[in-house]
Image: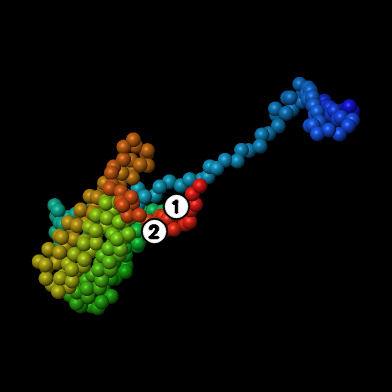
Amino acid sequence: MSELHFASPDGISLHLRLPQQPTDGIPDYRSSVKPTYQQIERFDTLPSRPEHTNTHRRFGNPTPVGLGGFLLANTPATIMLLGWHGAGGRNGNESAAVGRFMYMGCLLEIICGIGEWINGETFNAAVFLILGGYFGASGAVMMPFYNAIGGYGTDATAAAAAYHDSYAMLLIFMGVLLLFFTIASVRLDICHVVLFACFTVCFPCLATSYYYMADGNEDSARTFRIWGGIFSLAGSVLLWYLFLGSLLEAVDFPYLLPVGDLSKYVRGRTESLGRRRHKSSPSCGL
């Protein structure tokens, strides 16, 4: 049996023993490492390689920001519609809500919608971004800079009537939009279904109130404005409940508020297609 010996200047040696005749066995490889104290000290001071982990940058949940902005903009405006304690001048005037519409309803909703879009939440992003645009539009028409009423002529009565008829169209199509949100939320939970349903009824009531205001029928306008405020208040109460639930979830609270999950009853299209494919796929038994 022949032997080979290799030695490095660092004191690392390698011994190889090879048989003289070829065999089917595994050669006997033996190595002896005899590092000195200086080598050990040098090895310990070498920088270690960074470990590759699966951690990535995480973003916070923007939903509480959007819910809080909507609540602080909509709830006081709802009280103005109802005229509680003289709010809104007892005629639904929401001029005091311009700042809240622009900065809480519009700005915070849009920021939240962009955050939801970044997180891949398409439905949430659509809801918050569209509602943010609505609050911005509602606040803009109350500012003298935009001259929303003056653009309809110099006759104040005719201009106000034309403005009310025109603004009511936005409220009608907001009701259509909220109806679509209601249908889509059937895949989510009971709270969202009832929430969107409340505002689906609220917007047509407010639109009808504006039509009666254009006709000069103040009594009917007030009646439908109150009904719109009632449905808006009901939706706001549910939204406060969801806002609290989102905060409890954000801090990992041991108990969460029930919302009535419907996803287990209304299955998604991809899940249904996956089950159909599984049933239709051929199988063989052994």
Viewer-nearest of discs 2 and 1: 2
Residue 214: x %, y % from top left = 17, 73
> Residue at 79% of width from left, 31% of height from top?
25
Q: What residue is drawn where x is 74% and y is 24%?
A: 40
Residue furthest to the top: 37
Report x, y in % for residue 10: 82, 27
Residue 99 lies, in percent from the top left, at 30, 57
Could you say which is closer to the camera, residue 268 or residue 49?
268
Tag 1 or tag 2, which sits nearer the N-term?
A: 1
Image vertical order of residue 1 relative to residue 171, above or below: above
Kind of element beneath mark 2? helix
| Coordinates of residue 61 in the picture (x, y in percent) | 40, 47
Name the residue rendered at 18%, 61% in the picture: 228
From the viewer's perspective, tell me whether residue 199 is left or right of residue 35: left
Residue where numbered disc 2 is placed: 269
Q: Residue furthest left?
A: 219
Drawn side of residue 224 relative to residue 262, left or right:
left
**Other-residue count near label 1 (Cα within 10 Å), few / some / many at <14 / 14–19 / ≥20:** some
Q: Quadrant of the N terminus?
A: top right
Pick whichever, 273 or 129, lies toward us: 273
Dot 1: element: loop
Residue 180 in the figure: left or right of residue 83: right
Mark 2 is on which residue type?
A: Arg
Viewer-side residue, 188 vs 202: 188
Q: Is residue 207 visible?
A: yes
The residue at which mark 1 appears reads as 119
Q: Which residue shows up at 25% across the image and 73% down it?
A: 166
Q: How is the image coloured?
A: rainbow
The quarter of the picture where residue 135 lies is: bottom left
Q: Crowdedness of circle 2 by 10 Å Cα count: few (<14), some, many (20+)?
A: few
Q: Amino acid at mark 1?
A: Asn
